[in-house]
Image (cartoon, helix red, strand yellow):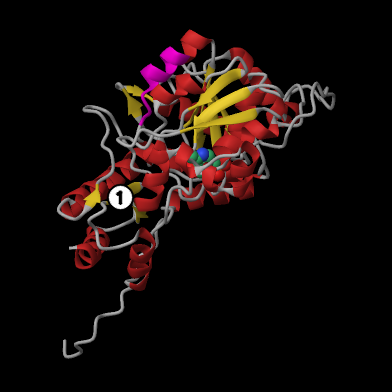
């Protein structure tokens, strides 16, 4: 090499999906089959999802987003005006907006800074006579303290709906998230999640009544789904509308991708875990708080790798993200807490001082690039940039 200029490396994005030939072939098969909306592949995706979670007795209901799944779960539980639902301020707005869709109110709670998950100790203080449910979020893929949350819920007669958008596959005390004793658990297959269908989600429940209601409400409030109607042996044009339902069904086009993404979920998680470990080793000596680790024996899918700058770091978070961007590295922030957004702040008169741990974490945090297709060299490039900037 005679050129001494820094080689121009391609931009390293914050997230990228990994779509293989299997997904593409299944997609083509679906397009050629003549059945592109909810049908046999969505059905198969539901069955295989239950198998993946390790319990084929679970009801798995494929939907077109996790937001839709959360909405359906709360609707099936009868959440409505005059009621309150408790969740973390340190989440994406979808977790909380579904409560408002139903006319109920959101009670936001601060996080435990050692896990970045909702602090169970603060949940109890937020309960009022109007509280009906808790929505814990397994932030970054790290399981919440579900024993503590279920104990509080049982004591106060509350329902638990887990926002598991980051948590595939996650275990909690050795049990897979999705198989615990919550009313419902909802997974996301958005483009940057651990598996993707472009857009999509899965509502998982053990409760026959919740499942039956969610299936009806997923598709316009029709009392049987379109697939049954159009493929039954007996000609059947008749249906009844039993409620003003939604349009939340997952297409077979999306499910075709989901089938193969699910088959690769373990490998994706291993690849993400390897990058997370490489980051841990390479960044440990820097003035940063490394991401919280799962309890011994538990599985963490590393949806996000979230660092917090220590006060002695010479950088502001914003300036560091800009410097990384200038070095061709994409980062993000998860999340701007709900109490900082105009809608939530104004509706509930919230202040940053009400959520000191979430606020402090937000001001110090950045999410590094992390996806299954990242190479060891890609991760090394991030580590070296961080060492150069922060070392
Ligand atoms: C992505 C996400 C959602 C919403 O998922 P969609 O499938 O995009 O609706 C909900 N909660 C959290 C924590 C998320 O990260």
Dividing the image into 4 quarters, which one contains the C terminus? bottom left
Q: Is residue 344 left or right of residue 154?
A: right
Asked where in the image residue 143 lies, by quadrant, the reply is: top left
Instruction: Tell me which segment is drawn in magenta.
Output: 143-152
Q: Is residue 252 left or right of residue 153?
A: right
- Asked which secondary structure carries label 1, the reply is strand
Asked whether the viewer can see residue 12, the reply is no
Query: In the rendered view, would you say 239 is above or below 251?
Result: above
Q: Position of residue 254 (x, y in %)?
A: 57, 44
The residue under label 1 is: 307
Asked whether the viewer can see residue 316, the reply is yes
Query: In the rendered view, would you say 162 is above or below 371?
Result: above
Other residues around mark 1 within 10 Å, as few (<14) / some (14–19) / many (≥20): many
Q: Position of residue 207 (x, y in %)?
A: 56, 14
Residue at (47% x, 25% y) in the render: 50
Residue at (72% x, 37% y) in the render: 247
Query: In the rendered view, would you say 41 is above or below 77?
Result: below
Using the image as rendered, state which of residue 175 and residue 97 is in the foreground. Answer: 97
Q: Position of residue 23 (x, y in %)?
A: 48, 48
Q: Main secondary structure of the magenta part?
A: helix
Dividing the image into 4 quarters, which one contains the N terminus? bottom left
Using the image as rendered, state which of residue 349 and residue 57 is in the foreground. Answer: 349
Residue at (33% x, 48% y) in the render: 306
């Amino acid at each position: 090499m005679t050129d001494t200029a820094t080689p121009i490396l391609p931009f390293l994005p914050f997230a990228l999906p990994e779509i293989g030939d299997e997904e593409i072939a299944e997609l083509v098969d679906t397009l050629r089959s003549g059945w592109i909306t909810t049908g046999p592949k969505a059905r198969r995706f539901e069955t295989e999802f239950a198998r993946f979670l390790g319990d084929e007795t679970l009801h798995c209901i494929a939907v077109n987003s996790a937001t839709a799944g959360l909405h359906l779960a709360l609707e099936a539980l009868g959440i409505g005006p005059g009621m309150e639902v408790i969740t973390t301020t340190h989440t994406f707005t979808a977790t909380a907006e579904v409560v408002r869709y139903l006319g109920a109110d959101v009670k936001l709670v601060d996080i435990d800074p050692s896990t970045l998950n909702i602090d169970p100790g603060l949940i109890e203080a937020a309960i009022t006579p109007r509280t009906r449910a808790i929505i814990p979020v397994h932030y970054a893929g790290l399981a919440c303290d579900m024993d503590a949350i279920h104990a509080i819920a049982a004591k106060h007669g509350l329902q638990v709906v887990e926002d598991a958008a980051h948590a595939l596959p996650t275990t909690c005390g050795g049990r897979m998230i999705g198989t615990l004793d919550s009313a419902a658990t909802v997974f996301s297959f958005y483009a940057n999640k651990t598996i993707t269908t472009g857009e999509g989600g899965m509502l998982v429940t053990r409760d026959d009544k919740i499942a039956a209601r969610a299936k009806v409400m997923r598709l316009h409030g029709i009392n049987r789904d379109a697939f049954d109607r159009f493929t039954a042996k007996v000609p059947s044009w008749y249906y009844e509308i039993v409620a003003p339902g939604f349009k939340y069904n997952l297409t077979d086009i999306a499910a075709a991708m989901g089938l193969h993404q699910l088959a690769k979920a373990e490998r994706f998680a291993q690849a993400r875990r390897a990058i997370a470990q490489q980051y841990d080793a390479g960044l440990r000596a820097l003035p940063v708080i490394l991401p919280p680790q799962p309890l011994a024996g538990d599985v963490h899918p590393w949806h996000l790798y979230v660092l917090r700058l220590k006060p002695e770091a010479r950088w502001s978070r914003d300036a560091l993200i800009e410097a990384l961007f200038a070095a061709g590295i994409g980062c993000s922030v998860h999340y701007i807490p709900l109490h900082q957004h105009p809608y939530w702040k104004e509706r509930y008169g919230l202040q940053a001082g009400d959520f000191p741990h979430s606020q402090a974490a937000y001001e110090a945090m950045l999410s590094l690039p992390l996806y299954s297709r990242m190479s060891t060299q890609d991760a090394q490039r991030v580590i070296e940039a961080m060492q150069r900037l922060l070392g």
